[in-house]
Every structure is written in structure tokens, then in C-alpha cells.
């Protein structure tokens, strides 16, 4: 139980950092829409990001050592 | 001690040479760019125990997940904003704001066009003031950064970007040389960028 709350805390911090990092990118995308809708869009994008980060598991990464060896074996 | 460190170096360069192609993979490259990751990688090669390899594996998995997240968010922002715009446009085209139809609440003026009921629009009703650069800025960070510029820098930016004058025209207006204006403009942009990055 304690572990889970700590996990969520870490996840929240990570999301916050990602949102901060992408702030400029979001602002840039706002330029293409009507000026009256910009605030809405920025909020919706942020909401969507949080929603997706909370729900999607970004697993199934390749194994490092396999990746390093793979190209070599292909060459042979 | 010294002998071993030279030996270590040799082993490392040997490994790097041998796996040059796979280490050029952008994902791997980005992973090894981080100093702590590289240290883990180094120890795993020099002391190839299962534990050390596992450490690299774990760190690499974390890196992969991070990269995947960034990629995902990047395309999410791009496509979501496009979709949002489409949605708004579609909505606006389907639900036009039409005021000309009959209204049950306005019996006396029933059937009259809205424009006939309104007093003619006088142009003076609109705001006729000058377009001021600072009134047009919506980004609060940019606004703050603009405040930090000198008066001359701000003036030149305003003339260049809002009044759409050329450098040459600004030089004539301010009684200066185009080179000087260009210099000030460049410095202003540089300062703005520095402020915004911080």
C-alpha cells in the first residue's frame, strides 16, 4: 500500500517535469488555432498528456545487450 | 594499478571498435551520452558479471521508456492540436450564429432583420488607438522579457515586426545607419532568447 502511493508520487513528479519540458512545444502549437481557443487547447492538450501518461504503460523495451549484438550477427 | 587501467582502456576501445555499428544506433548512442549510464556500461564490459549487465539493462529500460514517452507526447501534441482545430471549424460551420430568424420573445419587432433594428455602426465605436507591441503580446514570459529590453531595442523590434518597416526605413526614421539598427536588432533578439531560455 505504501509502495503504491510512493509510486504514484514519483509518477506525478515525472509528469509534471514532462509537462514543463513540453511547455514551449505546446505554446508553439497554439499559434495555429484561433486566438480565442488557445487557452482551451492548451488545457486540453495538457489534460490529454496526463491522461495518456497515467494510462499507457511504456514497456516492451529491447534488451540492451541483445541490441548491441544483433547488428554484429546480421553482418556475419 | 597503472597497468590494469591501460589494459582496461584497451578492452574498452576493443569493444567499442567491435560493436561500432550497433553503438551508432541513436537509441544506444543517446543512452551512453549520459555520464552515469556510460559508467555502468564501462564496468559491465570490464567486469562482465551478470549483476553488472543487469544494471545496464535496467537503466537502459528506463531510458527507452523515457524516449518512448517523449516521442509519444510529441506526436500527441502535434496531432491533437490539428484535430482540435478541425473540430472547432466543423462546429462553427455547422452551428452558424444566425440572428435574422423570427424570435418569439420580440413580438413588436418580429420579422425584422437584426441589422435593421440596430443603430448604424459608427466607426468611432471601435478602438482607434495605436497598435502597441506590448498590448499584442499574449505570452507572459515574452512580455516579461520584453520589459527587460532597452527603450531603443523595444522600439526597433516594434517598428520591424509590428509596423513591418525594413531595416533601411527604420534607419532613416531614427536617423541612424542600417548596420547600427541591424546590430541593435540582433542584440535585442539575443537578449530575448537568453531571457526566455532562463
Image: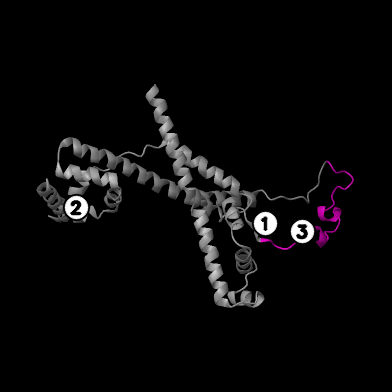
Q: Are tags 3 and 2 found on a single chain?
A: no
Q: Nearer the viewer, residue B187 or B132?
A: B187
Report the side of B8 relative to A56 (left or right): left
Residue at image mark 1: B135
Q: How is the image coloured?
A: one colour
Q: Residue at x 52, y 54 (%)?
A: B196
Residue at image mark 2: A71
Q: Is residue B70 above or below residue A57?
A: below
- Magenta part of the protein: which range? B105-132
Q: Quadrant of the N terminus of chain B?
A: top left
Q: Are marks 3 and 2 in contact (CB under 8 Å)?
A: no
Q: Mark 2, mark 1: which one is toward the viewer?
A: 1
- Chain letter of the residue carrying label 1: B
Q: Marks 3 and 2, how far apart in space?
A: 67 Å
Q: Is residue B52 above or below residue B172?
A: above
The disc, 1 or 3, on the residue closer to the chain's N-terminal end is 3
Can residue A33 be seen at all in this image of the molecule?
no
- Chain letter of the residue carrying label 3: B
Q: Is residue B127 above or below residue B73?
A: below
- Residue B75 lies, in percent from the top left, at 43, 50
Q: Main secondary structure of the magenta part?
A: loop
Q: Which mark is residue B70?
A: none
Residue at image mark 3: B127
Q: Residue at x 43, y 46 (%)?
A: B73
- Residue A29 lies, in percent from the top left, at 52, 53
Amino acid at each position: 500500500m505504501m509502495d503504491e502511493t510512493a509510486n504514484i508520487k514519483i509518477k506525478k513528479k515525472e509528469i509534471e517535469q514532462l509537462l514543463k519540458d513540453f511547455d514551449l512545444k505546446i505554446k508553439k502549437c497554439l499559434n495555429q488555432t484561433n486566438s480565442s481557443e488557445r487557452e482551451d487547447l492548451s488545457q486540453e492538450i495538457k489534460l490529454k498528456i496526463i491522461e495518456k501518461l497515467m494510462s499507457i504503460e511504456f514497456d516492451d523495451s529491447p534488451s540492451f545487450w541483445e541490441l548491441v549484438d544483433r547488428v554484429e550477427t546480421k553482418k556475419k | 594499478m597503472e597497468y590494469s587501467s591501460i589494459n582496461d582502456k584497451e578492452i574498452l576501445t576493443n569493444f567499442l571498435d567491435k560493436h561500432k555499428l550497433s553503438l551508432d544506433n541513436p537509441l544506444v548512442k543517446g543512452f551512453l551520452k549520459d555520464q552515469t549510464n556510460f559508467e555502468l556500461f564501462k564496468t559491465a564490459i570490464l567486469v562482465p558479471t551478470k549483476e553488472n549487465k543487469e544494471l545496464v539493462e535496467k537503466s537502459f529500460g528506463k531510458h527507452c521508456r523515457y524516449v518512448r514517452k517523449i516521442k509519444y507526447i510529441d506526436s500527441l501534441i502535434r496531432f491533437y492540436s490539428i484535430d482540435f482545430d478541425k473540430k472547432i471549424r466543423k462546429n462553427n460551420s455547422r452551428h452558424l450564429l444566425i440572428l435574422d430568424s423570427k424570435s418569439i420573445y420580440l413580438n413588436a419587432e418580429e420579422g425584422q432583420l437584426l441589422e435593421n433594428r440596430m443603430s448604424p455602426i459608427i466607426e468611432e465605436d471601435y478602438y482607434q488607438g495605436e497598435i502597441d507591441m506590448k498590448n499584442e503580446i499574449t505570452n507572459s514570459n515574452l512580455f516579461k522579457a520584453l520589459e527587460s529590453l532597452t527603450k531603443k531595442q523595444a522600439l526597433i523590434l516594434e517598428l520591424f515586426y509590428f509596423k513591418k518597416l525594413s531595416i533601411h526605413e527604420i534607419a532613416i526614421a531614427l536617423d541612424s545607419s542600417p548596420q547600427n539598427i541591424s546590430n541593435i536588432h540582433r542584440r535585442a533578439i539575443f537578449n530575448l532568447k537568453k531571457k526566455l531560455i532562463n
